[in-house]
Image: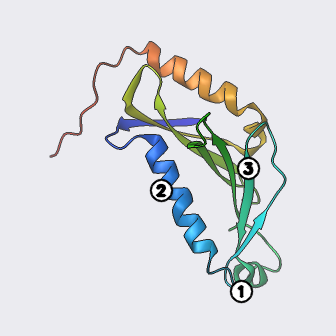
Amino acid sequence: MQAVIKPDQQGANVINARRLERIQNDRLSDGPLRQYEDLESEFGLDGRFQIRYPVLEKKRNGGKYSTKEYFLKRDQNGAVKYLFECYPYAHSPGCNVKFNLSSDPDILVDIKFGRHHMANWEDIIRASNKKITSWGLRKLEIVAN
C-alpha cells in the first residue's frame, strides 16, 4: 500500500464527483475506441463499471491491460464519497482512492493498494486515516522553490 498526502482546497468529494461527471459525459460517446460496461456491484459498494479499449486489446492479442474498473460509494445524501479506480488486468493489478482525512478535511489522502485487497476497502481507509492522524499533522503547505 502507498499513501500520498497533500493540502486540499477542493475536497475529495468534489474531486470524485467531477471525475465521475467527466466519465459520464465521455460515456455519451461510447464507441469502438472506448466501451463502457456496467458490472454487478461488489464489496458493499453502490456501483461498479469498467471502461475497455477494444482497439488496444486487439493490438495486444486480447490483453485487457488498459481496462479501468471503477467502484463507487455514495454518502447518505447520494453524493460521491469514494471513487475507486482500478486496473484489474495489469501485471500488478491495483486500485487507488482519494479521500479527506477525517481529523483534518484540509488534507487529501490518495491511497494505492493491490486490487486483491478491494474487499477490505473500509479497513484500508480506516487504518490509513488512523495512522496518518496519529502523526499529529497540524498543517500542510506547498512551498515553492
**Residue 97 percent location from the top left of the image:** 57, 43
Disc 1 designates what residue? 32
Q: Tell me, what colour scheme is on the image?
A: rainbow
Q: Secondary structure at mark 1?
A: loop
Q: Residue at x 60, y 66 (%)?
A: 24
23 sits to left or right of 139:
right
Q: Residue furthest front?
A: 77
Lower position in the chain sequence, tag 2 or tag 3: 2
How far apart, in angstroms, are the residues tagged by discs 3 and 1? Answer: 24 Å
Q: Residue at x 28, y 30 (%)?
A: 140
Disc 2 designates what residue? 18
| Front of the two marks 1 and 2 | 2
**Residue 59 percent location from the top left of the image:** 74, 84
Q: Counting other residues with Cα less than 10 Å from the Cα at mark 1, is it few (<14), some (14-19), or many (20 or more)?
A: few
Q: Residue at x 74, y 31 (%)?
A: 120
Q: Which mark is residue 47?
A: 3
Q: Residue at x 62, y 33 (%)?
A: 76
The residue under label 1 is which amino acid type? Pro
How far apart, in angstroms, are the residues tagged by discs 1 and 2? Answer: 25 Å
Q: Nearer the viewer, residue 128 or 59?
A: 128
In the image, residue 113 sits, relative to residue 92, either above or below, namely above
Q: Secondary structure at mark 2?
A: helix
In the image, residue 50 sits, relative to residue 25, either above or below, namely above
**Residue 57 percent location from the top left of the image:** 76, 78
The residue under label 2 is which amino acid type? Arg
Q: Nearer the viewer, residue 38 or 115?
A: 38
The residue under label 3 is which amino acid type? Gly
